[in-house]
Amino acid sequence: MRGRAFKWCIAAVLVLTVAGCGLFRWEKRAPWRDDAERECLASKQVKITEYVEPARGIDGPGACGMIAPFKVSAFAEGSVNLQARQTFACPMLPAIDQWIAETVQPSALFYYGQRVVGLKAGSYACRNQNNAYGGPLSEHAFGNALDVMAFELADGRTITIAKGWKGDLREQEFLREVFVGSCRIFGTVLGPGADPYHYDHFHLDLARHAGGRTICKPVLKFMPNLDPAKIRPVRPLPPPHMSPAISQAAPAPLAPRSAPPAHAAPLGGVSAVPMAPMAVPQPGGGAPRAVDLGALY
């Protein structure tokens, strides 16, 4: 009996050890991932700079990895720093630069009159979705995802998703504006309210979903202030990122939603310096034009 119990104990330890190590032996990397990487590399969309450096390919464990990853310390030609250097597959880099130019910077200029100059973010990790036991691999396992925990503005203030999502009105609307805009660029966008795992960050990835659908959660009833048809990409400023005039800019006082924006003409325009901050609407002013993001997935 003692010998049998010992064998059962050893068998149980081996099963738990192999399962717990997350070796992902049975999942294969989908062919489209390598194809997307090769297409991106051939297009030369990603330029090697002091902020973007090529790295050795990552092959495993299991299906994890990428053909030709990049180590990145800043996006948008070095104008948006990362707190720590991160690893990405090629296709994510032009998508992130587009997101910064068309969503993040226009939103920051609208609400704060400031550019975003830094991100607290994460990228590559060979793990399952939501760090769950078993289940499919996360897009992070292929360098195909970005987690954003916080935005740093040119004046030094930091807007975190954990506090800002339910923080003051300006933070709430800025983060929701970025969230809505992200759904036009990425295949998956998850944020607070999507599930218990994304209460403190935005998850953005280029996953390819069945039928070409976009997954954008949670479903929001939110009135965007930026019209996608009128937004032009905001060119990155060359480092150093800010001048004294930029760093000392202060947000404008809040105005009722029914009041027309005083700076509607240059909305989303290309500018070398930040626009004056737009008036941020108060809840309950005027008839809301709800945007149901449920239509996107």
Image: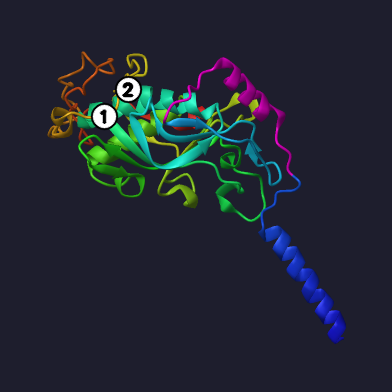
- Residue contact at pointers 2 and 1, CB within 8 angstroms: no
Give the residues drawn in magenta, as a range: 27-50
Q: Is residue 212 left or right of residue 49?
A: right
Q: Is residue 270 left or right of residue 96?
A: left
Instruction: Judge whether 161 appears above or below 53 on screen.
Output: below
Q: What residue sits 21% from the left and 24% below the top?
A: 274
Identity of the amino acid at label 1?
A: His
The location of residue 272, given as percent across then percent down, is 24, 18
Q: Nearer the viewer, residue 67 or 269?
A: 67
Q: Is residue 15 left or right of residue 113?
A: right
Residue assigned mark 2: 236
Outermost front residue: 50
State which quarter of the image contains the N terminus. Answer: bottom right
State yes or no: residue 129 in magenta: no
Residue assigned mark 1: 241
Q: Nearer the viewer, residue 219 or 27?
A: 27
State yes or no: residue 49 in magenta: yes
Category of crowding for the residue at label 1, using alpha-carbon neighbours closer than 10 angstroms: few (below 14), some (14–19), many (at least 20): some
